[in-house]
Image: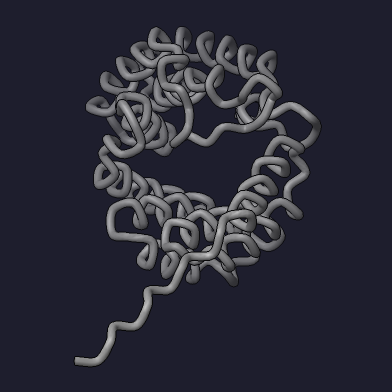
Amino acid sequence: MVRSCEGHTSTTGPDLRRIDLAAEAIRLTRSLHALLPDDSESAGLLALMLLTEARGPARTGPSGELISLADQDRCRWDTAAIAEGVALVTRALPRGPVGPYQVQAAIAAVHDEATSTEQTDWPQVLALYEVLERLVGSPVVALNRAVATAMVHGPAAGLAALAALADDPRLAGHHRLPAARAHLHEMAGDRERAIVDYRAAAARTSSLPEQRYLTMRAARLAAEPAPVAPEPKPEA
């Protein structure tokens, strides 16, 4: 799984993805699944890898810049990999027992089958993250659940969920927490706090594409004209 994670998002260096590592991880997992065809978690792991790597071609622009999920050209996603991944997790889930790889694959499938961020079934994503959090208790899963909460119940609810993670030592120094907070502040229209958190997140990641993306988001918000306050209405 380490190869797959590093292949999907390199922790250091100029490139966002390591395509060679991702391909090798998928090859090895295919071999594992062939040896254990009735094991639902090996099927879930293969599905997860296929469904996340299917978005790979759209995750970067012409200059290698990171493109967020919301802004990706979904026509560039690998539909064959998505179909295979969806079929794998659809067969695996009813067999049980349900494990974290299957749930993560189910979340990825919801994203991959949606035609846009707005058309994503966010209540289902949130419900799946709640299941996943009970299975693994990871602060990164809790962070993702907070973002899904914001998509369902609004940014204030998501920010409240993120606030509960602020003192978790497992996230100390991690860029994902301020990055998520910046995104939700931007959703809420709080430009100043979003800028501060985007810059903080950029300072914490060693991935150059992520640094550039987060710095660009802060710069774009800083360059936007301040909203004009409405003129007071004359007294009757």
Judge from the rendering whether residue 17 lies leftward or rightward of residue 74; answer left or right: right
Q: Position of residue 179 (x, y in %)?
A: 59, 54
The residue depicted at 39 percent of the width and 11 percent of the height is 79
The residue depicted at 38 percent of the width and 16 percent of the height is 82
Judge whether residue 190 can be spotted in this image. yes
- Extreme bottom residue here? 236
Q: Position of residue 69 (x, y in %)?
A: 47, 34
Which color scheme does this rendered protein use?
A: one colour
Q: Residue 190, relative to residue 203: is it above or below?
A: below
Judge whether residue 170 can be spotted in this image. no
Identify the image quadrant of the N terminus.
Answer: top right
Q: Quadrant of residue 113?
A: top left
Q: Quadrant of residue 51?
A: top left
Q: Position of residue 229 (x, y in %)?
A: 43, 73
The residue depicted at 25 percent of the width and 47 percent of the height is 123
Q: How many marks?
A: 0
- Extreme left residue here? 236
Q: Residue 168, relative to residue 121: is it above or below?
A: below
Most foreground residue, 55 or 225: 225
Judge from the rendering whether residue 166 lies leftward or rightward of residue 93; answer left or right: right
The residue depicted at 34 percent of the width and 83 percent of the height is 232
Most foreground residue, 225 or 93: 225
Judge from the rendering whether residue 206 lies leftward or rightward of residue 133; answer left or right: right
Q: Position of residue 219 (x, y in %)?
A: 67, 51
Q: Quadrant of residue 23?
A: top right
Q: Residue 139, relative to residue 105: is it above or below?
A: below
